[in-house]
Amino acid sequence: MITVYPLGVTIYRPDKCYNGYTLFSFPYEVGVFLIDMNGNLVHKWNIRAIRARLLKNGNLLVVERRKGEKNIVKELSWEGELVWEYESPLGSAHHDVVRLENGNTLILLQEPMPEEFRKKIKDPIRRSSRRILSDLVLEVSPTKKIIWEWHMYEHIDVNRYCKVCNPSDWSHTNTVQALPENRHYDAGDKRFKPGNILLSPRNLSFIFIVDKNTKEVVWEYSGNYAGGLAGQHEPHMIEKGIPGEGNILIFDNGAPPMRSWAHTGKSYVLEIDPVTEKIVWKYENGEKFYSAFRSSAQRLPNGNTLICESEGSRIFEVTPECEIVWEYAVEWHRILGRAYRYPYDYCPQLKALGRPSEKEVKPPSYVRTRPFDWQAYVSLRSTS
């Protein structure tokens, strides 16, 4: 049993990091937190958030978890005052919300599957469930008018399912993104038209893109590394101007449904080229890196990647060579949501704070900050 567990910032190399503020929450606790690179609390919002995103005006956009009630979307001011909220009559807000450049809001919700689609389910046990939850995507205007909607059961085969998951929780989608401008569309590939919708149904272990106009699925990826995707989170296309632009970054959890035992108890961060489906970059560290649920990965402007290992209770930044140059740890039993890094001048409120002190944090000399290279070790042993 470990008796000493380091907390707070355990590693910090200012010269190798993309320095800024990190936003995170604990989905089962009240509080969304903004910290500096040395772990000092800069700001806090008193709300229980499944998902939290900082907007460029300094407001906070969240999916609020409410006990015994439907989850709803809220926008809070920097001071925590309610600016806008949306509660859909169609379902409960679920896992993700995005503010679009046109001012509309893209919302992910869960809804019951209608009886006409339930009847199409071939497995009698699944079909007999009291209710089966599906997913719904809405684009809502500032005046709360529904601009666009998409129902999962209308476009994904209801007999495509996870055999070891709760039968009533069919797709469990956890991420939605409107595609940014990208090199694939510029080259003529219409599947990747900016504004098309990228979705991640965790329980189905694949990701896909929906054509915004036709509502049809035009691209999907289930992976082939370590047997393929398993309970993935946070897939998103990297924006132009950021290293890896046009590629898709995925936190591949390694949770059921799994197609290979090689994935058991191991998570991966994968960067793929969506056209060739080849892996461009990855982060892995065997059993020392694993989060069965939640988690996220964000490509930073300097080429580093910020990783939130939710059930490992830590957030860390790695270089393209997979060296950890920043790490923030919390108590092991406190499950994190997802984390994002924002530049010091991202919004007026952060800019007004000025650049904080950046003090290097050196771990003990015996601490390994790179994943163990087993192949290099085997090669060394064989030549010695």
Image: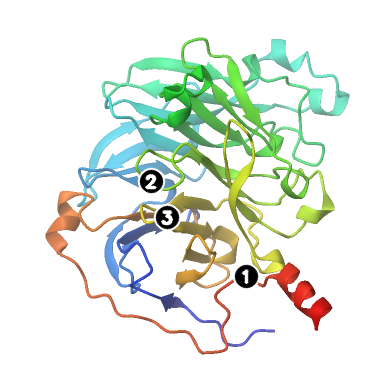
**Residue nearer the viewer, 211 or 303:** 303
Q: Secondary structure at mark 3?
A: loop
The vertical placement of 241 against 196, above or below, is: below
Q: CA distance from mark 2 to mark 3?
A: 7 Å
Q: For numbered disc 2, what is the local secondary structure?
A: loop
Is the C-beta separation of discs 1 and 2 under 8 Å?
no
x and y percentages locating residue 99 in the rendered image? 33, 33
If you read the primary sequence from the N terminus, does the residue marked by circle 2 or circle 3 appear first? Answer: 2
Q: Residues within 10 Å of mark 3 (few under 14, many from 20)?
A: some
Q: Residues within 10 Å of mark 2 (few under 14, many from 20)?
A: some
Q: Residue at x 27, y 55 (%)?
A: 343
Q: Amino acid at mark 2?
A: Ile
Sequence-first disc among 3 and 1: 3
Query: Which mark identifies residue 371?
Result: 1
Identify residue type, mark 1: Pro
Q: In the rendered image, which residue does mark 2 sit on?
A: 242
Q: Which residue is mark 3?
A: 303
Left or right of residue 148, residue 234 in this image: right
Q: Is residue 235 above or below residue 380?
A: above
Front residue (pair 302, 210): 302
- Which residue does the image show at 51% across and 58% down from the upper left? 308
Tag 1's secondary structure? loop
Residue shown at 51%/81% (left/top)? 6
Q: Quadrant of residue 223?
A: top right
Percent from the top left, x then y, of residue 212? 47, 16
- Counting from the top left corner in percent of width and height, residue 294 is at 57, 50
